[in-house]
Every structure is written in C-alpha cells, then in structure tokens.
Image: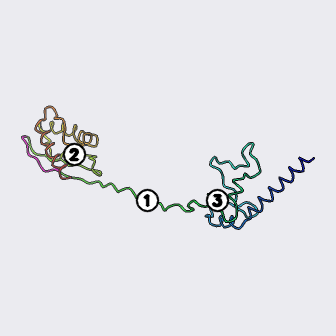
Amino acid sequence: MRRALLAITGLAASTTALVVLKGAPGTSQAAQDRPVAEAPVVPGGSAAPEPTPGGVTPSARPGASAKPSASAVASRTPGARTSATTRATTAAPRTTTSAPKVTTRTVTGPVVSYKYGSLQVRITLSGSRIVDATGLGMPLDGQSGLRSDDVQARYSGSSGEVVAKQSANLSTVSGATYTSTAYKQSLQAALDKA
C-alpha cells in the first residue's frame, strides 16, 4: 500500500513539474521563434515535441518511459533554450546558375586545289565538339568522282571519322590519297579558325 501511494505521488509530482515547466515563459518564446513550417501545433496550442533522428518520438519507442529524464527537465528551465532553437531557422538562399547555352556554329575551311580538282570542308561544332563534317565542291565525274565519294563516305557526316576522332588526324583513304590529303588540309584550317 505504501509503495502504491509513493508511486502515485511520484507520478503526480512529475506530471505537475512537466506541466509547469512546459508552460514556462522561456519555452513559449522558443516556439514563436521557429518558422511556421517547423512549429507543428498539438491541441491545446503548444508546440509538438521534436522528432528524434530516427523519426520515432520517445513515447513511441518500445520500453520507453513516460517520465521525463533529468536532462530533459533541466533543459526546459525558464530562460534556457533548447538545442533545437539555437540552430539556424532559415536556410541560406540557394544560388542557381543556369548551364551555359551551347552554341552551334559552322566553320568552313579554305578551298584547297589538288591534282583532280578542288574542295573545301565545312564543319559544324556544338560548343567545342565537332558534330558534323562535309566536303564541298568535290569532283563528281569519272574516277575523281569515285574517289570523292569514297572520301565523303569515310570522313563526312555525323558518324564519320572526323566526328569520331575530333581532329584532322585521319587515316588516308586507299586509292584516294590526293583527295584525302586535300580534305585533311581544309579540315585543319577550319579547325584552326574554330
């Protein structure tokens, strides 16, 4: 009987202390300092308890005691601020920078004359990357036309060797040495201008 009386008296005293300390003037000011989004309110108008790092409130943990610990009571004394109110309540403004706009431009190399005619190379760049290359003014007829077709097929286009290697260091097309050399010269000059 004596134990039950002491337990009831202890529970009543701790509940009274909790109510008195929770209603202390210093704690209501701490709740007002917090942004609206961070100060949830429970029925009765007081701020809800802070969730713990694991996301579980102390009363929801299995085996947790409903009585406040000595450190919890000490941290809620009038005039003392809890650690939750000492942290910054507003985040630093975010600075966002938009990605630089990639410019697509076309650069044309000089006309290069060679044994079978003349040609020039036009490249398209996206930023500093070559995305397309084309031979212009290449011979169309006879053997020269066939050689030009071979060079165009190997070097030009968005899937050609120029785009793959991103330079004028291209392999020579067999049977079209003069055309390949003229193409590379015009290409190198276009790259130098770019």
Looking at the picture, how far across and down is residue 70, in whole percent? 72, 53
Q: Which amino acid does label 2 sit on?
A: Thr
Q: How crowded is mark 3: few (under 14 residues within 10 Å), some or many (20 or more)?
A: some
Does the magenta run of residues contain 114? yes
Q: Tell me the residue that label 2 is attached to.
A: 134
Among the two numbered marks 2 and 1 on one chain, the one whose residue lies closer to the N terminus: 1
Q: Tell me the residue that label 3 is attached to.
A: 82
The image quarter in which residue 96 lies: bottom left
Q: How crowded is mark 1: few (under 14 residues within 10 Å), some or many (20 or more)?
A: few
- Secondary structure beneath dot 1 equals loop
User: Does residue 35 appear to the left or right of 48 in the view shown?
Assistant: left
Q: What residue type is labelled 1?
A: Thr
User: Does residue 60 appear to the left or right of 136 in the view shown?
Assistant: right
> What is the distance, in whole Å, between disc 2 and disc 1 at their CAs?
39 Å
User: Does residue 93 appear to the left or right of 175 in the view shown?
Assistant: right
Does the magenta run of residues contain 85? no
- Secondary structure beneath dot 2 equals strand
Among the two numbered marks 2 and 3 on one chain, the one whose residue lies closer to the N terminus: 3
Closer to the camera in the image, 145 or 121:
121
> What is the distance, in whole Å, between disc 2 and disc 3 at their CAs?
71 Å
Q: Is residue 76 above or below residue 4?
A: below
The image quarter in which residue 21 lies: bottom right
**Residue at the image position 65 percent from the left and 61 percent from the top:** 39
> What is the distance, in whole Å, between disc 3 and disc 1 at their CAs?
33 Å
- Secondary structure beneath dot 3 equals loop
Looking at the picture, how far across and down is residue 42, in whole percent? 73, 60
Magenta residues, start to end: 109-115
Foreground mark, 2 or 3, reads: 3
Closer to the camera in the image, 91 or 124:
91
Closer to the camera in the image, 103 or 173:
103
Q: Tell me the residue that label 1 is attached to.
A: 96
Q: Which amino acid does label 3 sit on?
A: Thr
